[in-house]
Amino acid sequence: MKLHQKGFLLVEISKATSIWDSDLITRALKEYGLNGSYWVNSLRVALDELAAAGLIVRIGSRLDDGKEIAPGALLFHWRLSEFGRTRMRDTGLLNYP
Amino acid sequence: MTSYVLNQAISQHHARNQRWGFTWAIWTAILWGAWYVPGTALWYEHPYVDIAADQQSLRLGATAVMTWIHAITVMLFLLLWNGVLGKVRDYGRTIVRFRKISKWYALASLCGGPMAIFGSYMAMGFVGPVFAAITSLFYPVVGAVIATLWYKEKISRRAAFGMSIIIMGGVVIYGPGLFGEMDITNNNAWLGYVGGIMSAIGWGAEGAVAARAMDVTDPDVGIQCRFSFEILFWGLLILPVLALFTDLPIWSLIVATVTGGKAMLWIFLAAACHAYCYTAFYKSFSLIGVGRGEAVGNLYAVFALIFIAMFTLQLPQWYFLVGLVLTVLGSFVMFAEPAESIAQLRDHGPVEEGA
């Protein structure tokens, strides 16, 4: 069985030193066979929730020039926080294959 | 110029998240308040109307039965919600990870269900409904304290001030009724006081415990997990124990409720309110935090009286207006908090590196 979506996002962030949300969303859409703006926004909300909880930290931001999600869309560059690493360890996500 | 536009976009992004968080919390309060109408009406239908007020053990048994059937109906509404949102598969993926993740939803369901609801009914039965309502109003304090101590949720002075005003407003709304309810000659009143404490701790702890799992899961999915576990606790543990080890007519109460059209109609309406009230509740936690979400949810005190007045055509007392002003004021104090300060809800450093 696949990992739940928020878990998948965390695992992908933890594998990289840092990652742009547009890349993360592309990977998540492919993993779950989804498409369309509803799922893009749903995944962006999930990333906002992870940031609000302190699991991921924003290390950069820029406006989309139209090549990623949509022209003028706000894009964030994320990395896992130390607290996020601890929480992933607690929930068995850090060593997920 | 680019930097200015970018900063503006980030600022609007935080403001939008804050607005959504408070909007979900206000929907929690509206639906929670509306829930009291069908929730109370249910007690006026067969088989519950046939139970005398002094038959405390039978009333508690009946409460367990109605809570279980109610939880099953809530589950159906949540399935509909997550079905429309396309999250049913994610529910399956989340609930199976019990040992590390969904166990926290199981614990949250114990806090919110058997502990808080049962405690609230004890407070109603052994002291009175006004006392039960007032003790429940203090649950955000418990939630905020647990969230702060356990995982360092940030509660700013402004947020704490807003919470205090909302709680004061609730006390003003229900407080005067308390004097007509307290009876110092009642020897069993201590059971009601224990029940009141159970409800405040239970509901307060539920948010903090659920947030532990919501850190890594979706709130829409989380609430469905929480109700799945509540159904199991009542259906596989509490009700069978009551049926086997007491002489309470649990089975006949279940049959009478399910076959009684009017009782089921009220349960259906109550469950619709409760399902989406809880969904909004959990969604607010992940955007504005447990403390703020629970405090704004406390506005249910106002909405409950408004809905009850609409359906019974009995206007509330004058002090309701004072309480209303206080609770609304408290909400504005909290909402006026800078959006950036709640973009990161916990003391684990800022949301943006270098900020």
Image: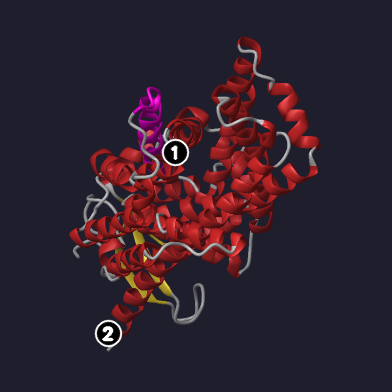
Disc number placed over residue B4 in the picture, else none: 2
Q: Secondary structure at mark 2?
A: helix
Classified by dominant secondary structure, the portion drawn in magenta counts as helix
The answer to whether residue B351 of the structure is visible from this angle is no
Q: Residue at x 59, y 53 (%)?
A: B37
User: Residue at horizontal 32%, vertical 51%?
Assistant: B291
For marks 2 and 1 on the same chain, the one whose residue lies earlier in the sequence: 2
Whole-angstrom CA distance, mark 2 to mark 1, is 58 Å
Nearer the observer, B202 or B321: B321
Q: In the rendered view of the protein, which quadrant contains the N terminus of chain B? A: bottom left
Q: Is residue B206 magenta?
A: yes
Residue B273 vertical placement versus B326 (above, below): above
As drawn, is B209 to the left or to the right of B91? left
In the image, the segment drawn in magenta is B185-211
Q: Is residue B305 visible?
A: yes
Q: Chain of mark 1?
A: B
Q: Nearer the viewer, residue B106 or B165?
A: B165
Q: Which mark is residue B128?
A: 1
The answer for which chain carries disc 2 is B
Secondary structure at badge 1 equals: loop
Q: Position of residue B127 (x, y in %)?
A: 41, 34
- Is B171 left or right of B273, judged from the image as shown? left
Give the farthest residue toward the top: B245
Instruction: Name the amino acid, label 2.
Output: Tyr
Spot occupied by residue B191 in the image (x, y as percentages of width and height)? 40, 25
